């Protein structure tokens, strides 16, 4: 049997957050650098996914703890979409991504990992960014340093989110 070591996941295992991790982020703005929050607006925030599909995987999340999109105020939905639009623009113009997947998994039956708090995924894509290891070994290979990618995105935030 082959082993793939991922010591950076040690912090995830040891520091399990009780309750909703997104509400934890809402309630702890003083640790935005640790939780990888990129921007906070009136009703939402943008965060890098700590366990991304590809480098630069972002999420737009409403501050309010809701599990049903239909319970979200229309003004907050519009705010989320403006943030998603700006995230896509930043990723394309500044990081030169080849494409972007957008999506929401509403409910655990739809594949939501954190079904109790709705969130929008913005997944940057590059040509040939998939390989056999995800399919065969159910393991993702992250092709770049997470922290440096966070810093690269963070430096462009003022330009797109003022």
Image (cartoon, helix red, strand yellow):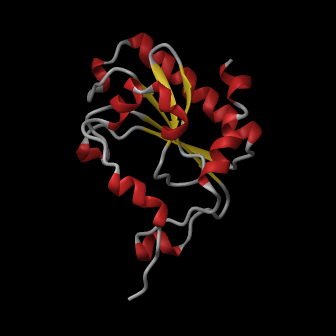
Percent across and percent down for residue 44 are: 46, 21
In x, y percent, where is residue 160?
69, 24
Work out whether 65 lies above or below 147. above
Q: Please tell me which residue is depicted at 23% across the width and 46% down the height of the picture.
A: 109
- Residue under the point 65% across and 59% down: 144
Image quarter (top left, top right, bottom left or bottom right) of the C terminus: top right
* Quarter occupied by the N terminus: bottom left
- Picture quadrant of residue 28: top left
Task: Tell me if residue 147 comes above or below residue 77 in the rendering.
Answer: below
- Residue at left 60%, top 53%? 146
User: Residue placed farthest to the bottom in the image?
Assistant: 1
Q: Position of residue 93 (x, y in %)?
A: 76, 37
The number of numbered badges drawn on the structure is 0
Residue 52 % position (x, y): 49, 52
Position of 86 with respect to 37 (left or right) is right
Give the camera-side residue of 15 and 148.
Answer: 15
Near-viewer residue (148 or 45): 148
Viewer-nearest residue: 49 or 37: 37
Which residue is at 52% across, 23% downward? 81
Give the vertical position of 39 relative to 101 (above or below). above
Indicate whether 137 appears above or below 46.
below
């Amino acid at each position: 049997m082959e082993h793939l070591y991922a010591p950076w996941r040690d912090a995830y295992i040891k520091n399990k957050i009780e309750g909703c991790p997104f509400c934890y982020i809402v309630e702890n703005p003083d640790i935005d650098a640790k939780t990888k929050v990129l921007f906070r607006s009136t009703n939402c925030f943008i965060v890098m996914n700590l366990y991304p599909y590809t480098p630069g995987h972002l999420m737009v999340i409403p501050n309010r703890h809701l599990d049903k999109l239909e319970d979200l105020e229309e003004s907050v939905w519009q705010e989320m979409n403006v943030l998603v639009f700006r995230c896509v623009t930043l990723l394309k113009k500044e990081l030169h991504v080849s494409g972007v997947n957008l999506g929401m998994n509403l409910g655990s039956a739809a594949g939501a990992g954190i079904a109790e708090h709705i969130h929008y995924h913005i997944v940057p894509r590059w040509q040939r960014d998939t390989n056999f290891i995800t399919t065969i070994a159910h393991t993702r290979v992250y092709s770049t340093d997470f922290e440096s990618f966070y810093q690269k995105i963070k430096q462009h935030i003022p330009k797109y989110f003022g």
